[in-house]
Image (cartoon, grey):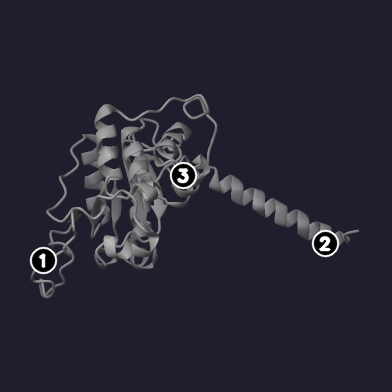
């Protein structure tokens, strides 16, 4: 039998766990399945004809006995077709195409934060909160967005336009603080430039991204320092890849590196 102290400790551990779960489930972005009218076993999903063509091109990159290697690009395709999130039916379709058990797809879609298991807004803002961005002001950026839109971390605005999520390092630390909005990075942010971005999104006039798929908001070019560009003066050549490397269909697992041109 548990002593009174042990019972008290056990109860407080359970209550801490419940609190943690309720904090995690407060937001709208989830990494697990939530049964809803838009997402249940009867929900329909199929790729469009155009996306079936894309799916076939993706599958052609891999040998027939490695179809599951196409799982992540196919999930990405499904998510884009479905307005930025993955219902059960979309994951089941990917499992069917890859010829694997649906649970294998659920595992991947739940693990990678690039996949959303619940709907997100038209503008999905992921603010990096890891140390370099935090030191350079990411908390002020989060606060600016929250104050400007009246939403909290993990929530979507009532108008359905904005979803806000704090995430870990997105690999643009040299230009901290930064936010990823849908596919694009906006870097070297300040409170003022963040507000400019929010106002532009409200009018559907988000500035086009820069040449490198990334737009530092302070006018600098890419992640050059104050001395300008001082490395990578030439574009490295990609390795030569034999276009017929999968022509026989199957690949011996022992030869994979040779076929991937390592
Ligand atoms: S710490 Fe923010 S992008 Fe790396």
**What number is the disc on residue 105?**
3
- At x 27%, y 60%, the residue is 259
Residue 143 lies left or right of residue 196; in this view the side is: right
Density class for disc 2 (Cα within 10 Å; few <14, some 14-19, many ≥20) is few
> Quadrant location of the N terminus?
bottom right
- At x 35%, y 32%, the residue is 82
Residue placed under numbered mark 1 in the picture:
235
Is residue 71 in view?
Answer: yes
Disc 2/disc 3 C-alpha distance (Å): 41 Å
Q: Dividing the picture into quarters, in which one does residue 45 lie? A: top left
Precedes in sequence: disc 2 or disc 3: 2
Of the two numbered discs 2 and 3 in the rendering, the one whose residue sits closer to the viewer: 3
Whether residue 226 is situated above or below residue 130 in the rendered picture: below
Of the two numbered discs 3 and 1 in the rendering, the one whose residue sits closer to the viewer: 3
Q: Residue 184 at what x, y percent from top left?
A: 24, 49
Whether residue 37 is situated above or below residue 150 in the rendered picture: above
Precedes in sequence: disc 1 or disc 2: 2
Residue 71 lies left or right of residue 180; in this view the side is: right
Residue placed under numbered mark 2 in the picture:
6
Foreground pick, 59 / 244: 244
Q: Residue 248 at what x, y percent from top left?
A: 28, 50
Is residue 114 in view?
Answer: no
Disc 1/disc 2 C-alpha distance (Å): 64 Å
> Quadrant location of the C terminus?
bottom left
- At x 29%, y 28%, the residue is 48
Q: Residue 233 at what x, y percent from top left?
A: 8, 71
Mark 2 beta carbon near ligand 1 (under 8 Å):
no
Residue 215 lies left or right of residue 106; in this view the side is: left
Precedes in sequence: disc 3 or disc 1: 3
Q: Residue 203 at what x, y percent from top left?
A: 21, 34
């Amino acid at each position: 039998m548990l002593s009174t102290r042990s019972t008290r400790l056990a109860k407080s551990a359970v209550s801490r766990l419940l609190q943690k779960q309720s904090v995690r489930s407060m937001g709208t972005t989830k990494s697990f399945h939530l049964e809803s009218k838009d997402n249940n076993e009867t929900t329909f999903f199929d790729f469009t004809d155009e996306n079936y063509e894309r799916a076939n091109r993706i599958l052609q990159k891999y040998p027939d006995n490695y179809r599951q290697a196409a799982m992540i690009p196919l999930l990405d395709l499904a998510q884009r077709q479905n307005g930025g999130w993955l219902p059960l039916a979309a994951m089941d379709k990917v499992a069917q195409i890859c010829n694997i058990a649906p649970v294998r797809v659920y595992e991947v879609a739940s693990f990678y934060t690039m996949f959303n298991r619940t709907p997100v807004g038209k503008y999905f803002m992921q603010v990096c909160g890891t140390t370099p961005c935090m030191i350079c002001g990411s908390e002020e950026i989060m606060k600016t967005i929250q104050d400007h839109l009246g939403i909290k971390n993990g929530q979507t605005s009532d108008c359905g336009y904005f979803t806000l999520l704090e995430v870990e390092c997105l690999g643009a630390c040299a230009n901290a603080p930064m936010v990823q909005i849908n596919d694009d990075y906006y870097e070297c942010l300040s409170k003022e430039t963040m507000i400019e971005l929010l106002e532009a999104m409200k009018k559907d006039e988000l500035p086009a991204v820069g040449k490198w798929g990334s737009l530092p908001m302070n006018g600098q070019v890419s992640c050059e320092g104050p001395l300008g560009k001082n490395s990578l003066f030439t574009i490295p050549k990609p390795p030569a890849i034999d276009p017929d490397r999968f022509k026989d269909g199957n690949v011996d697992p022992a030869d994979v590196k040779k076929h991937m041109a390592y």
